[in-house]
Image (cartoon, grey):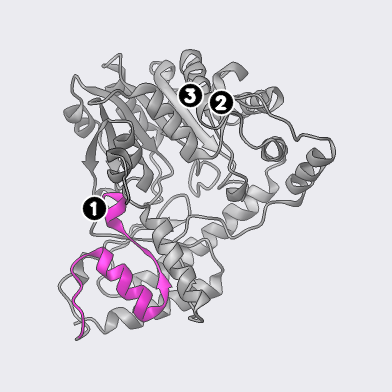
Amino acid sequence: MEYLSDRIKSLSVSQTLAMAQKSRDMKESGIDVINLSIGEPDFNTPDEIKEAAKRAIDDNYTHYPPVPGYPDLRKAISEKFKRENGLDYSPEQVVVSAGGKHSIINVVLSLVNPGDEVIIIAPYWVSYYDQIILAGGKPVVLKTGIENDFKLTAPELEEAITDRSRLIIFNSPSNPTGMVYSRSEMEALARVVEKKKDLFLISDEIYEHITFEGKHESMASFDFISDRVITLNGVSKGYAMTGWRIGYIGAPIWLAKAVTKLQGQFTSGVSSISQRAALAAIQSDDGPRKEMRDAFLKRRDLICGLLMEIEGMKIRVPQGAFYVFPDVSSFFGKSDGSRTINDSTDLAMYILEEAHVAVVGGAGFGAPDCLRLSYATSENELIEACQRIKEALARLK
Protein backbone atom coordinates (compact mmCIF):
# COMPACT_ATOMS: atom_id res chain seq x y z
CA MET A 1 0.00 0.00 0.00
CA GLU A 2 1.29 3.46 -0.91
CA TYR A 3 0.56 6.45 1.27
CA LEU A 4 1.92 9.79 0.13
CA SER A 5 1.51 13.20 1.72
CA ASP A 6 -0.62 15.82 0.02
CA ARG A 7 2.57 17.87 -0.12
CA ILE A 8 4.42 15.43 -2.35
CA LYS A 9 1.34 14.71 -4.45
CA SER A 10 0.99 18.43 -5.18
CA LEU A 11 4.41 18.53 -6.86
CA SER A 12 4.94 17.89 -10.54
CA VAL A 13 7.96 16.11 -12.00
CA SER A 14 10.53 18.46 -13.51
CA GLN A 15 9.88 18.38 -17.26
CA THR A 16 13.50 19.11 -18.07
CA LEU A 17 14.74 16.18 -15.99
CA ALA A 18 11.97 13.91 -17.30
CA MET A 19 12.84 14.65 -20.93
CA ALA A 20 16.55 14.21 -20.22
CA GLN A 21 15.83 10.81 -18.67
CA LYS A 22 13.68 9.71 -21.61
CA SER A 23 16.41 10.68 -24.06
CA ARG A 24 18.98 8.76 -21.98
CA ASP A 25 16.72 5.70 -22.01
CA MET A 26 16.46 5.91 -25.81
CA LYS A 27 20.22 6.26 -26.13
CA GLU A 28 20.76 3.19 -23.96
CA SER A 29 18.47 1.24 -26.30
CA GLY A 30 20.74 2.13 -29.22
CA ILE A 31 18.94 5.17 -30.67
CA ASP A 32 21.10 8.12 -31.72
CA VAL A 33 19.47 10.93 -29.73
CA ILE A 34 20.81 14.50 -29.65
CA ASN A 35 19.96 15.97 -26.26
CA LEU A 36 19.02 19.67 -26.32
CA SER A 37 16.86 19.36 -23.19
CA ILE A 38 19.28 19.74 -20.32
CA GLY A 39 20.57 23.01 -18.89
CA GLU A 40 24.18 22.03 -18.43
CA PRO A 41 27.40 23.38 -19.97
CA ASP A 42 29.09 20.70 -22.06
CA PHE A 43 32.50 21.92 -20.88
CA ASN A 44 34.50 20.18 -18.17
CA THR A 45 35.37 21.89 -14.91
CA PRO A 46 38.67 23.80 -15.35
CA ASP A 47 41.75 21.87 -14.20
CA GLU A 48 42.81 24.34 -11.49
CA ILE A 49 39.42 23.91 -9.80
CA LYS A 50 39.69 20.11 -9.94
CA GLU A 51 43.21 20.33 -8.50
CA ALA A 52 41.88 22.38 -5.57
CA ALA A 53 39.39 19.60 -4.83
CA LYS A 54 42.14 16.98 -4.92
CA ARG A 55 44.24 19.05 -2.50
CA ALA A 56 41.24 19.38 -0.21
CA ILE A 57 41.02 15.60 0.09
CA ASP A 58 44.75 15.35 0.84
CA ASP A 59 44.41 18.20 3.35
CA ASN A 60 41.65 16.25 5.13
CA TYR A 61 38.70 18.50 4.40
CA THR A 62 36.61 15.47 5.25
CA HIS A 63 34.80 16.57 8.40
CA TYR A 64 31.54 18.40 8.98
CA PRO A 65 31.80 21.94 7.55
CA PRO A 66 30.04 24.94 9.12
CA VAL A 67 26.34 25.02 8.20
CA PRO A 68 26.46 28.30 6.19
CA GLY A 69 29.78 27.46 4.52
CA TYR A 70 33.49 27.75 5.29
CA PRO A 71 34.44 31.26 6.46
CA ASP A 72 37.05 31.75 3.72
CA LEU A 73 34.54 30.76 1.02
CA ARG A 74 31.90 33.13 2.39
CA LYS A 75 34.53 35.87 2.51
CA ALA A 76 35.50 35.17 -1.12
CA ILE A 77 31.83 35.31 -2.16
CA SER A 78 31.43 38.60 -0.27
CA GLU A 79 34.43 39.99 -2.15
CA LYS A 80 33.06 38.64 -5.45
CA PHE A 81 29.75 40.44 -4.85
CA LYS A 82 31.65 43.69 -4.27
CA ARG A 83 34.14 43.26 -7.12
CA GLU A 84 31.81 42.02 -9.85
CA ASN A 85 28.41 43.37 -8.83
CA GLY A 86 29.04 46.40 -6.62
CA LEU A 87 27.05 44.80 -3.79
CA ASP A 88 27.84 45.05 -0.09
CA TYR A 89 27.14 41.69 1.49
CA SER A 90 29.34 40.87 4.48
CA PRO A 91 30.50 37.24 4.87
CA GLU A 92 27.85 36.87 7.60
CA GLN A 93 25.20 37.66 4.98
CA VAL A 94 26.33 34.81 2.73
CA VAL A 95 24.98 31.25 2.96
CA VAL A 96 26.38 28.41 0.83
CA SER A 97 23.95 25.64 -0.13
CA ALA A 98 23.74 22.50 -2.26
CA GLY A 99 23.12 24.26 -5.57
CA GLY A 100 20.98 27.19 -6.66
CA LYS A 101 17.79 25.14 -6.35
CA HIS A 102 18.56 24.48 -2.68
CA SER A 103 19.32 28.16 -2.13
CA ILE A 104 15.94 29.19 -3.54
CA ILE A 105 13.86 26.73 -1.51
CA ASN A 106 15.74 27.82 1.63
CA VAL A 107 14.67 31.42 1.05
CA VAL A 108 11.10 30.55 0.04
CA LEU A 109 10.58 28.38 3.13
CA SER A 110 12.09 31.08 5.34
CA LEU A 111 9.87 33.90 4.00
CA VAL A 112 6.59 32.45 2.77
CA ASN A 113 3.66 31.49 4.99
CA PRO A 114 0.70 29.42 3.77
CA GLY A 115 -1.49 31.66 1.63
CA ASP A 116 1.21 34.24 0.92
CA GLU A 117 1.45 35.22 -2.75
CA VAL A 118 4.70 34.78 -4.66
CA ILE A 119 4.97 36.51 -8.03
CA ILE A 120 6.79 34.69 -10.81
CA ILE A 121 7.25 35.88 -14.38
CA ALA A 122 6.32 33.42 -17.13
CA PRO A 123 8.23 31.95 -18.83
CA TYR A 124 9.86 30.93 -15.53
CA TRP A 125 12.34 28.28 -14.49
CA VAL A 126 10.39 25.08 -13.85
CA SER A 127 11.15 24.68 -10.13
CA TYR A 128 9.97 28.13 -9.00
CA TYR A 129 6.29 27.17 -9.23
CA ASP A 130 6.54 23.89 -7.35
CA GLN A 131 8.80 25.28 -4.64
CA ILE A 132 6.15 27.91 -3.90
CA ILE A 133 3.52 25.17 -3.68
CA LEU A 134 5.77 23.18 -1.36
CA ALA A 135 5.95 26.18 1.00
CA GLY A 136 2.16 26.52 1.01
CA GLY A 137 2.35 29.76 -0.95
CA LYS A 138 0.19 30.83 -3.86
CA PRO A 139 2.01 31.28 -7.17
CA VAL A 140 0.91 34.41 -9.02
CA VAL A 141 2.00 33.94 -12.62
CA LEU A 142 2.51 37.05 -14.74
CA LYS A 143 2.61 36.05 -18.39
CA THR A 144 4.83 37.70 -20.95
CA GLY A 145 5.02 37.10 -24.70
CA ILE A 146 7.61 36.71 -27.39
CA GLU A 147 6.42 39.97 -29.00
CA ASN A 148 7.75 41.83 -25.91
CA ASP A 149 10.93 39.74 -25.61
CA PHE A 150 9.32 37.85 -22.71
CA LYS A 151 9.83 40.82 -20.38
CA LEU A 152 7.55 42.16 -17.66
CA THR A 153 6.75 45.86 -17.45
CA ALA A 154 6.44 47.94 -14.30
CA PRO A 155 2.69 48.60 -14.77
CA GLU A 156 2.06 44.87 -15.14
CA LEU A 157 3.94 44.17 -11.92
CA GLU A 158 2.19 46.96 -10.03
CA GLU A 159 -1.23 45.67 -11.04
CA ALA A 160 -0.42 42.20 -9.67
CA ILE A 161 0.71 43.27 -6.21
CA THR A 162 -1.81 42.76 -3.39
CA ASP A 163 -1.78 42.84 0.40
CA ARG A 164 -0.84 39.14 0.32
CA SER A 165 2.20 39.62 -1.95
CA ARG A 166 5.30 38.53 -0.06
CA LEU A 167 7.95 37.67 -2.63
CA ILE A 168 8.92 38.13 -6.28
CA ILE A 169 11.32 35.78 -8.06
CA PHE A 170 13.21 37.60 -10.80
CA ASN A 171 15.67 35.99 -13.22
CA SER A 172 18.05 37.71 -15.65
CA PRO A 173 19.63 36.31 -17.79
CA SER A 174 16.55 34.14 -18.06
CA ASN A 175 16.11 30.42 -18.08
CA PRO A 176 14.29 29.49 -20.34
CA THR A 177 14.22 32.51 -22.69
CA GLY A 178 17.79 33.80 -22.52
CA MET A 179 16.46 37.34 -22.33
CA VAL A 180 18.37 39.97 -20.33
CA TYR A 181 16.74 42.97 -18.69
CA SER A 182 18.42 46.35 -19.15
CA ARG A 183 19.24 48.47 -16.13
CA SER A 184 16.44 50.91 -16.93
CA GLU A 185 13.92 48.05 -17.23
CA MET A 186 15.08 46.68 -13.89
CA GLU A 187 14.96 50.05 -12.18
CA ALA A 188 11.33 50.51 -13.27
CA LEU A 189 10.44 47.18 -11.63
CA ALA A 190 12.49 48.05 -8.53
CA ARG A 191 10.55 51.30 -8.10
CA VAL A 192 7.35 49.25 -7.93
CA VAL A 193 8.85 46.93 -5.31
CA GLU A 194 9.98 49.97 -3.31
CA LYS A 195 6.37 50.96 -2.62
CA LYS A 196 5.48 47.83 -0.62
CA LYS A 197 7.79 47.64 2.38
CA ASP A 198 7.10 44.00 3.27
CA LEU A 199 7.67 42.71 -0.27
CA PHE A 200 10.93 40.85 -0.96
CA LEU A 201 12.68 39.88 -4.18
CA ILE A 202 14.93 36.95 -5.11
CA SER A 203 17.25 37.96 -7.92
CA ASP A 204 18.34 34.72 -9.60
CA GLU A 205 21.64 35.58 -11.31
CA ILE A 206 22.97 32.07 -11.93
CA TYR A 207 23.62 32.88 -15.63
CA GLU A 208 25.43 36.13 -14.83
CA HIS A 209 28.65 35.11 -16.59
CA ILE A 210 26.86 34.08 -19.79
CA THR A 211 25.72 37.51 -20.95
CA PHE A 212 26.41 38.41 -24.57
CA GLU A 213 25.49 42.09 -24.75
CA GLY A 214 26.25 44.85 -22.27
CA LYS A 215 27.00 44.44 -18.58
CA HIS A 216 25.22 42.17 -16.14
CA GLU A 217 23.08 44.14 -13.68
CA SER A 218 22.05 43.06 -10.17
CA MET A 219 18.74 43.99 -8.58
CA ALA A 220 20.42 44.64 -5.23
CA SER A 221 22.43 47.45 -6.85
CA PHE A 222 19.35 49.67 -6.46
CA ASP A 223 19.99 50.94 -2.96
CA PHE A 224 16.37 51.86 -2.33
CA ILE A 225 15.39 48.15 -2.24
CA SER A 226 18.75 46.48 -1.50
CA ASP A 227 17.69 45.58 2.05
CA ARG A 228 14.85 43.46 0.59
CA VAL A 229 16.74 41.73 -2.22
CA ILE A 230 18.18 38.23 -1.93
CA THR A 231 20.87 37.72 -4.58
CA LEU A 232 21.19 34.13 -5.74
CA ASN A 233 24.16 32.74 -7.62
CA GLY A 234 26.35 29.67 -7.82
CA VAL A 235 29.18 27.99 -9.66
CA SER A 236 27.22 25.53 -11.82
CA LYS A 237 26.78 27.52 -15.03
CA GLY A 238 29.62 30.02 -15.15
CA TYR A 239 32.33 27.57 -14.11
CA ALA A 240 30.95 24.31 -15.61
CA MET A 241 30.44 22.82 -12.15
CA THR A 242 26.88 21.48 -12.23
CA GLY A 243 27.79 18.23 -10.49
CA TRP A 244 29.60 19.93 -7.61
CA ARG A 245 26.27 21.28 -6.28
CA ILE A 246 27.24 24.67 -4.88
CA GLY A 247 24.88 27.64 -4.83
CA TYR A 248 24.88 30.66 -2.56
CA ILE A 249 22.91 33.73 -1.52
CA GLY A 250 23.64 37.20 -0.28
CA ALA A 251 20.79 38.34 1.96
CA PRO A 252 19.81 40.63 4.84
CA ILE A 253 21.57 39.33 7.97
CA TRP A 254 18.33 38.28 9.69
CA LEU A 255 17.34 36.21 6.66
CA ALA A 256 20.81 34.68 6.27
CA LYS A 257 20.52 33.52 9.89
CA ALA A 258 17.06 32.07 9.23
CA VAL A 259 18.29 30.20 6.15
CA THR A 260 21.22 28.84 8.19
CA LYS A 261 18.78 27.67 10.86
CA LEU A 262 16.65 25.91 8.26
CA GLN A 263 19.62 24.39 6.45
CA GLY A 264 20.90 23.07 9.76
CA GLN A 265 17.84 20.85 9.95
CA PHE A 266 17.87 19.77 6.29
CA THR A 267 21.41 19.20 5.03
CA SER A 268 23.68 20.83 7.59
CA GLY A 269 26.75 22.11 5.75
CA VAL A 270 27.19 21.07 2.13
CA SER A 271 30.02 19.00 0.63
CA SER A 272 33.36 20.07 2.07
CA ILE A 273 35.28 19.10 -1.07
CA SER A 274 32.87 20.96 -3.34
CA GLN A 275 33.25 24.08 -1.19
CA ARG A 276 37.03 24.03 -1.60
CA ALA A 277 36.58 23.68 -5.36
CA ALA A 278 34.09 26.57 -5.33
CA LEU A 279 36.60 28.75 -3.48
CA ALA A 280 39.16 28.11 -6.22
CA ALA A 281 36.55 28.87 -8.88
CA ILE A 282 35.46 32.18 -7.40
CA GLN A 283 39.07 33.30 -6.93
CA SER A 284 40.19 32.17 -10.41
CA ASP A 285 40.80 34.45 -13.38
CA ASP A 286 38.00 34.85 -15.87
CA GLY A 287 39.79 33.28 -18.85
CA PRO A 288 37.84 29.98 -18.88
CA ARG A 289 34.56 31.85 -18.33
CA LYS A 290 35.22 34.09 -21.31
CA GLU A 291 36.08 31.10 -23.47
CA MET A 292 32.81 29.41 -22.56
CA ARG A 293 30.82 32.58 -23.11
CA ASP A 294 32.40 33.13 -26.52
CA ALA A 295 31.62 29.53 -27.49
CA PHE A 296 28.01 29.92 -26.37
CA LEU A 297 27.72 33.16 -28.35
CA LYS A 298 28.94 31.42 -31.49
CA ARG A 299 26.49 28.58 -30.93
CA ARG A 300 23.66 31.01 -30.28
CA ASP A 301 24.19 32.66 -33.63
CA LEU A 302 24.40 29.26 -35.31
CA ILE A 303 21.23 27.74 -33.83
CA CYS A 304 19.14 30.90 -34.18
CA GLY A 305 20.11 31.16 -37.84
CA LEU A 306 19.18 27.55 -38.47
CA LEU A 307 15.87 27.72 -36.61
CA MET A 308 14.89 30.89 -38.45
CA GLU A 309 15.00 28.86 -41.66
CA ILE A 310 12.17 26.64 -40.37
CA GLU A 311 8.83 27.98 -41.51
CA GLY A 312 6.45 28.45 -38.60
CA MET A 313 9.07 29.02 -35.89
CA LYS A 314 9.02 32.45 -34.22
CA ILE A 315 12.41 33.32 -32.75
CA ARG A 316 13.73 36.03 -30.47
CA VAL A 317 17.52 36.00 -30.31
CA PRO A 318 18.56 35.55 -26.65
CA GLN A 319 21.05 37.90 -25.01
CA GLY A 320 22.33 35.47 -22.41
CA ALA A 321 22.30 31.94 -20.92
CA PHE A 322 22.35 29.05 -23.43
CA TYR A 323 18.75 28.54 -24.45
CA VAL A 324 16.52 29.57 -27.31
CA PHE A 325 12.76 29.59 -26.73
CA PRO A 326 10.81 29.66 -30.00
CA ASP A 327 7.05 30.08 -30.23
CA VAL A 328 5.82 26.97 -32.07
CA SER A 329 2.06 27.49 -31.82
CA SER A 330 1.76 27.55 -35.63
CA PHE A 331 2.26 23.76 -35.57
CA PHE A 332 -0.65 23.09 -33.21
CA GLY A 333 -3.50 21.23 -34.90
CA LYS A 334 -1.21 19.82 -37.58
CA SER A 335 -0.69 16.11 -38.18
CA ASP A 336 1.81 13.74 -39.80
CA GLY A 337 -1.04 11.40 -40.67
CA SER A 338 -0.79 9.25 -37.58
CA ARG A 339 -0.76 11.80 -34.76
CA THR A 340 -2.01 15.33 -34.22
CA ILE A 341 0.00 18.00 -32.41
CA ASN A 342 -2.18 19.65 -29.78
CA ASP A 343 0.41 21.58 -27.80
CA SER A 344 4.14 22.02 -27.25
CA THR A 345 4.31 18.90 -25.07
CA ASP A 346 3.00 16.86 -28.01
CA LEU A 347 5.45 18.61 -30.31
CA ALA A 348 8.43 17.92 -28.03
CA MET A 349 7.50 14.25 -27.92
CA TYR A 350 7.02 14.17 -31.70
CA ILE A 351 10.46 15.72 -32.22
CA LEU A 352 12.02 13.21 -29.82
CA GLU A 353 10.38 10.17 -31.39
CA GLU A 354 10.57 11.22 -35.04
CA ALA A 355 13.71 13.39 -35.18
CA HIS A 356 15.53 11.83 -32.22
CA VAL A 357 16.21 15.25 -30.73
CA ALA A 358 15.30 15.95 -27.09
CA VAL A 359 13.78 19.37 -26.42
CA VAL A 360 11.40 20.51 -23.66
CA GLY A 361 7.79 21.64 -24.04
CA GLY A 362 7.03 25.08 -22.67
CA ALA A 363 4.13 24.13 -20.36
CA GLY A 364 6.45 23.46 -17.42
CA PHE A 365 7.88 26.96 -17.87
CA GLY A 366 4.44 28.57 -17.89
CA ALA A 367 4.60 29.12 -21.67
CA PRO A 368 2.70 26.32 -23.44
CA ASP A 369 3.16 27.87 -26.90
CA CYS A 370 6.94 27.45 -26.82
CA LEU A 371 9.78 24.94 -26.79
CA ARG A 372 13.09 25.23 -24.96
CA LEU A 373 16.23 24.16 -26.77
CA SER A 374 19.60 24.20 -25.03
CA TYR A 375 22.57 24.96 -27.25
CA ALA A 376 25.10 23.71 -24.69
CA THR A 377 26.45 21.14 -27.11
CA SER A 378 28.82 21.02 -30.07
CA GLU A 379 28.26 22.98 -33.27
CA ASN A 380 28.12 19.76 -35.31
CA GLU A 381 25.38 18.38 -33.08
CA LEU A 382 23.43 21.64 -33.30
CA ILE A 383 23.59 21.56 -37.11
CA GLU A 384 22.46 17.93 -37.20
CA ALA A 385 19.71 18.51 -34.61
CA CYS A 386 18.25 21.48 -36.48
CA GLN A 387 18.27 19.55 -39.75
CA ARG A 388 16.43 16.67 -38.12
CA ILE A 389 13.88 19.02 -36.56
CA LYS A 390 13.36 20.82 -39.87
CA GLU A 391 12.69 17.55 -41.70
CA ALA A 392 10.30 16.26 -39.02
CA LEU A 393 8.32 19.49 -38.85
CA ALA A 394 8.00 19.56 -42.63
CA ARG A 395 5.97 16.33 -42.38
CA LEU A 396 3.29 18.09 -40.32
CA LYS A 397 0.43 19.28 -42.51
The amino acid on which the numbered mark 2 sits, given as a three-letter code, is Val
The answer to whether 182 appears left or right of 70 in the picture is left
* Residue type for callout 1: Glu
Residue bearing mark 2: 95
Camera-side mark, 1 or 2: 2
- Split into 4 quadrants, where in the image is the C terminus? bottom left
Few, some or many residues within 10 Å of mark 1 (<14, 14–19, 20+): few
Q: Position of residue 96 (x, y in %)?
A: 58, 30
In primary-sequence order, the first of circles 2 and 3 is 2
Q: CA distance from mark 3 to mark 1?
A: 41 Å
Q: Is residue 344 magenta?
A: yes
Whole-percent x, y for residue 287 in the image: 69, 48
Percent position of residue 269, x then y: 61, 29
Indicate left or right for 240 with 6 as reference. Answer: right
User: Which numbered dot is residue 147?
Assistant: 1
Taking the spot 57% from the left edge, 52% from the top edge, the residue there is 293
